[in-house]
Amino acid sequence: MAEELRLPISADVDVVEARQQGRALAAVAGFSSGEQTVIAAAISEIARNILMYAKKGEIFLTLATNGDRQGVVVVAKDQGPGIPDIERAMQYGYSTSHGVGAGLPGAKRLMDEFNVDSVVGQGTTITMKKWRRIV
Amino acid sequence: MDTKKSTSVSTTRPAEPPVLSESAAGLLRELVAHLRQNRTQLREEWARRITRAELLTAMTEEEIFAEATAVYDNYVEALETGTFEALQAYSRRLSERIIPRGVETDEVVGIVLLLRDVLARSLFTKYQDNVDKLNRILDSYEPAANRIANTVAVGFVEERERIIRQQQDAIRELSTPVLQVRERLLILPIIGVIDPQRARQLTEQLLRAIRANRAKVVVIDVTGVAAMDSGVANHLVQTVEASRLLGATVIVTGLSPEIAQTLVTIGVDLSEMATVGDLQGGIEEAERLLADRAIPSPQRETSPDNQR
Amino acid sequence: MEVPILRQGQYLIASIQSALTDADLSHLREALIAQVGRSRCRGVIVDVTALDVMDSFAVRTLRDIAHMARLRGAETVIVGIQPDVAFAMVQLGLTLKGVATVLDLEEGLAFLNRRGEERLLETKPKRSSDRG
């Protein structure tokens, strides 16, 4: 159906590329400038996560339609060490007392849907989506 | 193959297609074939009844005929395939065309029901000698026909709602709730019920206004807000923090005890948030801050930082 | 991507021109720290007007810069955070607490000047003829 954009992540220039492509796709989907920034920020966080923990991976960007909503789907895949305790990983950085958390819990806060699939020793797949009403 | 030339449908029976198996699927196929064969006169009959019922008065006869053809074909196709996505999509497109012409919901529902009736009557006529078969055909026809009427009506209503939302959004964008009282001072009065989308819009408008007006102080007045759930309260906190990032100090006024409680519940340290009882007091405090030139530096740590 | 760092009196001004990678941000931090250490610098301005996203790494780096600069007696102020960027930051939970943020370069210089005055007053011995 919709075309998928595949972005390899193996260096920190790729993080910049991924978030810029994410912003562009969000613009095509009709998101406001503010929401484009939000989507770009979420992509930046998970792309950096790939670099930090798995050294390399991929991010796939697609447009999607669901009834009267249109949106952006971001899938981040790596064959890294995996996340042993997903719940704990999602809690770290939740409190804003330090203000420099972000990472997975940060990205989750920015997006409408957020799903983490991870197997220790095999890798991690993160799927996140943001929707807007087609008005 | 349409062998009939006459335009009247009530007394002449059309040529019968070969009899298929009596399974429901077979009956449905037979029904669809009948509707296709007699497309011309059934469609004309329907158009006549639309005019007689004084529906779609906003449209000319040619327009009605053109749309009637498309509706009829979509109708029969929905019956045939049993799927309604194409019909739904068509219904929304049709609604998009006719709503600006002033066509009302009751008219759209009315014409679809008329079509259902016209087709049903033709079935009565065709199978009048075989009541048993007629009943079986109707068993196939009725649920499908009702679903079609439903689909078209819902498509129309959804399209209307979409247009209304669009208009409301346009009005909201035009009406800027942020007021510039004097140089460097903005007031944002919030009134009524705030849904998440409206909250986001208000924040975006406020931040843009801060930048455009180079505001140093913003007074957000929530006197007019009856209640605030934790989501909106959280949003208020985010707005205060985002304003700080743009160099503006925020004073929140009109906090009711209930809203103050909600803020505390979500973990806000009220001693960190500048609050004043009412809007007037808030404006006076803002003027004091501006005159002072010693506006507390945004984000300054409270611990002494001049240890050398 | 090298970020130009200008000197204006006792202040350093780093103007970010375009999107920066994490490595670029780290280089900027090192460059600023080195320059603050070398000269008698009283203030650092980092202009982020051109940044279309500020994520956790960017915020961490800016906080590091402010912290290191403070240790060397210089005040840091971040200027030019865009409205959309500020909104995304707070939704991410990044607050830049402890670092001064103002609207633009003009405000940034005014801020540093004020801070300079305040610190001067703080270190002066109290006199009854002091104006408030």
Image (spheres, coloured by chain):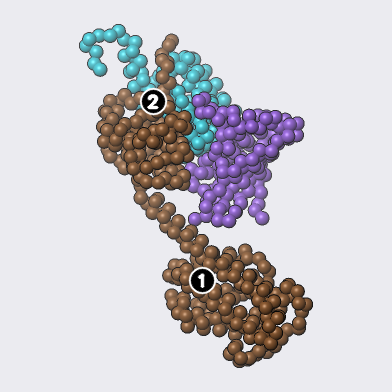
Chain colours: A purple, B brown, C cyan
Residue farthest front in this picture: B132
Does residue A69 appear anywhere in the picture? yes
In the visual, does B255 lie left or right of B125? Answer: left
Q: Earlier in the sequence, mark 1 or mark 2?
A: 1
When the figure is inspected, residue C68 is found, relative to residue A71, above or below; the finding is above
When the figure is inspected, residue B210 is found, relative to residue B91, above or below; the finding is above
Which residue is disc 2 drawn over? B271
Residue kind at label 2, given as amino acid type: Ser
Pointer 1: residues within 10 angstroms few (<14), some, or many (20+)? Answer: some
Give how far apart the Cα atoms at labels 1 and 2 are: 59 Å
Q: Are marks 1 and 2 on the same chain?
A: yes
For this rendering, which residue is in front, C132 or B259?
B259
Residue B241 x/y as whole percent: 43, 32
Pointer 2: residues within 10 angstroms few (<14), some, or many (20+)? Answer: few
For this rendering, which residue is in front, B154 or B88?
B154
Which residue is disc 1 drawn over? B109
Q: Residue at x 47, y 27 (%)?
A: C96
When the figure is inspected, residue B116 is found, relative to residue B99, above or below; the finding is below
Residue C36 x/y as whole percent: 48, 17
Q: Determine contact: label 1, label 2, CB under 8 Å.
A: no
Residue kind at label 1, given as amino acid type: Val
